[in-house]
């Protein structure tokens, strides 16, 4: 295969890879490093505190979530747009075989300006596509080249878009390990927010009379939700909250759990924490929403449920799941190597 010169545009919310929370940044890291290991010439445009083996172009000196002024959500958004402008400035008059955009809609209006227009650009969607302001941008750039991360994600688009491929997210499986025997608790790992089902996870644990250990970051927009709905239910015994955790802590939390409880309340385009759990051997109990049926094999690597009562029933049946089946499922379908293979196929198809 021809060796490609690739510009990888990462979000600047978190560093690449993220120290703790940051799904998109982790995927960008996994893809960047895998492509570079195959001899491709990759330039990563990301925050300056990112760690990579490729050429790093710092868009901001540090990830913007770490900046004090980013506590104001409007300022944070403004910094993201400034970052997109700096990416455009860098790309002008450069030569790449392909520009892979992971920063979404903010880059699209500038992809056709002088100095960039001659370079092929593809955009991977990492989020939900129904936000009204995003939908307006996509309506104007429907013919751009898009890649989805699940087939369900495409259904959230309000405009018919030019999808050239679907590529599932992948993890570096060598950074995880298999846990054949769990401890006596269930896990919740996600942003502490309404859409991730933090409150519902607690209700499930209480009804099933099982221990629940919860981990995740709390965004400023979710602080009231945590204070009002979640914190009063944390007793430090049956329901524990350990905050935002790093990779090693995450592996321990997931691997030692009987199952990951994920009662999501939204059409999640890809649950990265689902595959992180299963690679450790830990099955997932998740609501039938979003990409869940594309990731979890019902009855084999977890249970797909419709609501709290069914989740409680499946907790009682969790011992029927073979943990090795969970591990093998991710190893076969959701590795970073598999992801890179699929992206290279998409690049070559796009480049003709």
Image: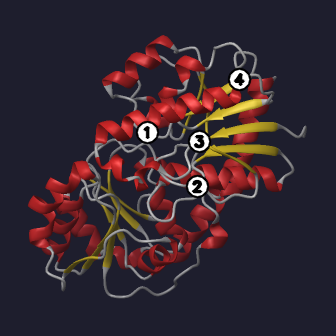
- The residue singled out by tag 1 in the image is 127
Q: Quadrant of residue 1?
A: top right
- The residue singled out by tag 4 in the image is 92
In what element is the residue under mark 4?
A: loop
In what element is the residue under mark 1?
A: loop
Question: Which numbered disc flags the more N-terminal residue, 1 or 4?
Answer: 4
Residue at 51% x, 65% y: name it: 19
Spot occupied by residue 204 in the image (x, y as percentages of width and height)? 19, 67
Q: Nearer the viewer, mark 3 or mark 1?
A: 3
- The residue singled out by tag 2 in the image is 16
Q: Is residue 121 visible?
A: yes
Residue at 32% x, 87% y: name it: 184
CB contact under 8 Å: marks 2 and 4:
no
Vertical relation: 120 (above or below) 174: above
Residue at 37% x, 73% y: name it: 259
Q: Quadrant of residue 235?
A: bottom left
């Amino acid at each position: 295969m021809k060796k490609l010169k690739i510009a990888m545009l990462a979000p600047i919310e978190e560093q690449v890879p993220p120290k703790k929370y940051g799904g998109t940044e982790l995927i960008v890291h996994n893809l960047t490093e895998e492509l570079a290991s195959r001899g491709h010439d990759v330039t990563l445009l990301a925050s300056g505190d990112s760690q990579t083996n490729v050429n790093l172009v710092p868009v901001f000196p540090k990830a913007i979530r770490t900046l004090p002024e980013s506590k104001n959500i409007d300022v944070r958004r403004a910094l993201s747009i400034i970052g997109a402008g700096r990416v455009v400035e860098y790309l002008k008059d450069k030569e790449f075989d392909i520009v892979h955009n992971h920063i979404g809609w903010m880059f699209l209006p500038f992809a056709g300006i002088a100095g960039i227009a001659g370079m092929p650009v593809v955009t991977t969607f990492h989020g939900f596509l129904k936000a009204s302001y995003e939908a307006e941008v996509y309506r104007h750039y429907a013919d751009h080249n898009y890649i989805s991360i699940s087939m369900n994600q495409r259904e959230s688009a309000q405009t018919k878009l030019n999808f050239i491929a679907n590529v599932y997210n992948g993890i570096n499986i060598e950074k995880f390990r298999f846990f054949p025997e769990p401890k006596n608790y269930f896990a919740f790992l996600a942003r502490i927010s309404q859409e991730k089902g933090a409150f519902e996870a607690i209700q499930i644990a209480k009804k099933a009379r099982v221990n629940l250990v919860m981990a995740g970051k709390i965004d400023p927009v979710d602080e009231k939700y945590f204070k009002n709905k979640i914190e009063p239910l944390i007793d430090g015994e049956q329901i524990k909250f350990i905050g935002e955790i790093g990779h090693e802590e995450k592996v321990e939390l997931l691997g030692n759990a009987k199952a990951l409880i994920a009662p999501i309340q939204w059409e999640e385009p890809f649950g990265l924490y689902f595959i992180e759990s299963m690679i450790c051997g830990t099955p997932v109990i998740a609501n039938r929403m979003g990409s869940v049926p594309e990731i979890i094999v019902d009855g084999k690597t977890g249970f797909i449920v419709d609501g709290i009562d069914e989740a409680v029933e499946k907790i009682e049946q969790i011992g029927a799941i073979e943990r090795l089946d969970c591990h093998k499922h991710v190893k076969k379908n959701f590795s970073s190597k598999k992801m890179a293979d699929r992206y290279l196929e998409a690049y070559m198809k796009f480049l003709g």
